[in-house]
């Protein structure tokens, strides 16, 4: 419910604070890796790259701590972590510019 409510705000670039609040609720109620990706996207649009980096780090920790619950094989887990790490590094570079 919170994810579907978040999308109109995110995709229209309106009320990003509201989108962020809704994705935070979704993460608290039942986090999934893609929730963290969406939160990173929202934070980046808000030019809050340091927080987006922290969110990516939280996502990696979540994946590592919930490997069994996610039901992912090793390749999928490693690929997701690799993608988060790449995104984190890109955000760090854009922050220093």
Image: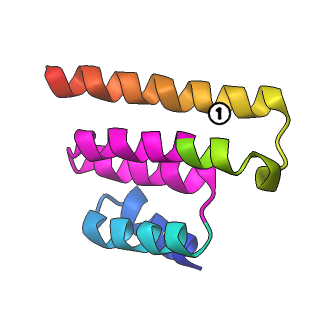
Q: Residue at x 54, y 57 (%)?
A: 35
- Residue 93 x/y as whole percent: 26, 19
- Residue 73 x/y as whole percent: 85, 35
- Magenta stretch, residue numbers: 31-60
Left/right of residue 78 with respect to residue 45 in the rendered view? right
When asked about the image quadrant of residue 9, the answer is bottom left
Q: Which residue is mark 1?
A: 80
| Farthest-out residue, bottom | 1
- Secondary structure category for the residue under label 1: helix
In-front residue for pair 42/80? 80
Image vertical order of residue 49 relative to residue 96, above or below: below
Magenta span: helix, strand or loop, mainly? helix
- Residue 66 x/y as whole percent: 70, 51
Q: Residue at x 23, y 51 (%)?
A: 46
Left/right of residue 72 with respect to residue 25 in the rendered view? right
- Residue 64 x/y as whole percent: 65, 41
Q: Residues within 10 Å of mark 1 (few under 14, many from 20)?
A: some
Per the image, is 33 magenta? yes
Q: Residue at x 46, y 75 (%)?
A: 25
Image vertical order of residue 94 relative to residue 23, above or below: above
């Amino acid at each position: 419910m919170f994810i579907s409510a978040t999308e109109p705000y995110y995709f229209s670039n309106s009320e990003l604070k509201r989108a962020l609040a809704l994705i935070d609720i979704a993460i608290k109620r039942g986090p999934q890796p893609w929730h963290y990706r969406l939160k990173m996207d929202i934070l980046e649009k808000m030019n809050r790259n340091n927080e987006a980096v922290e969110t990516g780090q939280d996502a990696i920790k979540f994946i590592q701590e919930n490997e069994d619950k996610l039901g992912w094989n090793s390749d999928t887990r490693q690929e997701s972590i690799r993608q988060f790490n790449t995104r984190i590094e890109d955000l760090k570079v854009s922050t220093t510019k």
